[in-house]
Image (cartoon, rainbow, N blue to C red):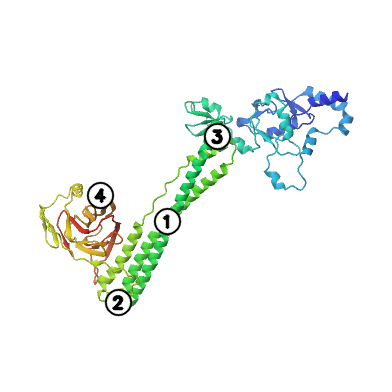
Amino acid sequence: MAKMLKKLQEELICSVCLDIYRNPVCLSCGHSFCEECIQSLLRNQLRPQNFFNCPLCGAQEATPTKLQPNVQLRSVVQNFLDTSKESATTEEKPKHEMECEGDAWREGENSDVRDEEILCDFCLREPQPAVKTCMTCEASMCQAHLGKHSTKAFLASHVLVEPCDARVLAARRCAQHGKLLECYCVTDSVCVCILCCATNSHKSHEIISMEEAFGQAQNDFSGTLQQLKNHEAEVNRSLENLLSHQGKIKALESSHRNHLEKSFNAIHEQLDRRKAEILGAISAIEEEQLSHTETRIKEHKEMKDAVSSDVQELEALRNQKDPVLFVKGLSAVQARKQKQVPSNDDEELAELLSAMDGSIRETIQELFQPYAHLIVHTMPSEESLPVHEHLTFESCQASGFHVEDKVLTVVKQRDLYFPYEWNNVPFWVYSTESFCNGQHFWEVITSKSSCWKVGVSDNCLQCYLEESHSHLRVFLDKNQIKSQPLKTDIRKVRVELDCERKTVSFLYMSGKKRSGFPSRCVPIATVKIPVCYPVFAAFSISNGSLSLS
């Protein structure tokens, strides 16, 4: 009798709670469960479009609005309980409780660790840690419920993975069809389900299995990681150069500020007004340069943070064993475009140096020439000031031009409506003097011409300042370096050549004068020139005349 009761009891066990049925209800697939168990599953198990899977056979059906009681099974259960009442109250212990006691948490274990565990979805009284997650059932199971799940032959095709939470389960399913992501679309670099492969969106694309995609992703992982690390190193190098450039600007400003202070202290009563003007210009240039550099530093830091984040994400992905998550993670990182690291140049630094030096030289040479020897002795730098070269034109023969020692004149007016033709085939006149070392400057009176070029040449390459059509333009051969509209009449142009630094600076003096003061030299641009010495002063003109000062 006891043996028959035990065998009957095995047939009356709910597959969810592993206890005897309590108020059994029936699903449309024919399987029965405790009413409390099935209600709990309906609350916790989320399916797209409100569908529900049978915990036993996995059959998908619409979420029932009302559970149908299994009257016949309920009668059988009641008869069994009445027959075995005495033994059930003294000896029988629910199978679920016995298995939970065997896997109970060790006394004193930290509760925070328990919270991090993936718990069994079928345990109703005290959920136990899950050992597997069924992707078909979308449920995590403890060892006891996994054993029950594995004994069913029709569940053998279900996909079992390591325990994972609802977020990971959702990531492994197609958002459109709710099917498992079992394939990979090489054309679009995305994980897809079987239905996606059959629809128009991926029908003609190259599709491979998830296992093959996982293998390819593992092969690409090292290369992608190394590429990101190289990019990170390049960003770091560029950032270090910018920080160094920032330090140079600050040091240069400090050095020239001290230089100015020592110079102006000797003649402060006469230089107060001029000193304030120059220091203001220096501060404005410094602020502009530092602002530009700080903006670039910020951009580089953002690039560094972005690539560091990608590297960290890939490092974290290294140990990912799940093929889908590994492929999706690597594809997401590879899809992010990496900004090209901009190159650094010191053109702004050279312009800053030229502007500061030009202001100092202008004050010394034009306003207080009698005191120049006193100021030069106080300068901490051993560099000599640029020498004013009083040039003459080299003799030449050309139709429509007249050349004297210091005057170049257009006898026959050239057509100003075709500036590009003039640019392509200019007529150049060179100085009789050439330069191989040192610092030099010369001045050219341009007030009698509206279309001219002034610069330097090594017979192969020209660097020059041009005025045409009310614009000032700076060229290095045929490459335009700078262009700006001309807002005032230019009276005189000054060209400064530094053979050691290989730079040419252009400044101009406007036609307007202030009472008691000569007009200021206004810096235009400083250009680095890849020349071969000797270098000659070069001139070209399309109308009027040029005169060497």
Q: Position of residue 527 (x, y in %)?
A: 29, 57
Nearer the observer, disc 3 or disc 2? 3
Instruction: Please state, as top left, top right, bottom left or bottom right, where the C terminus lies in the image.
Output: bottom left
Q: Earlier in the sequence, mark 3 or mark 1?
A: 3
**Which residue lies at the image location 66% right of the left edge and 25% below the top edge?**
59
Q: Earlier in the sequence, mark 4 or mark 2?
A: 2
Structural distance between the alpha carbons of marks 4 and 1: 30 Å
* Label 1 secondary element: helix
Q: Are marks 3 and 2 in contact (CB under 8 Å)?
A: no
Q: Earlier in the sequence, mark 4 or mark 1?
A: 1
State which quadrant residue 364 falls in: bottom left
Structural distance between the alpha carbons of marks 1 and 2: 38 Å
Q: Callout 4, which amino acid?
A: Lys
Q: Tell me, for residue 241, which label it has, or none.
A: 1
Structural distance between the alpha carbons of marks 4 and 3: 54 Å
Q: Tell me, for residue 397, which label it has, or none.
A: none
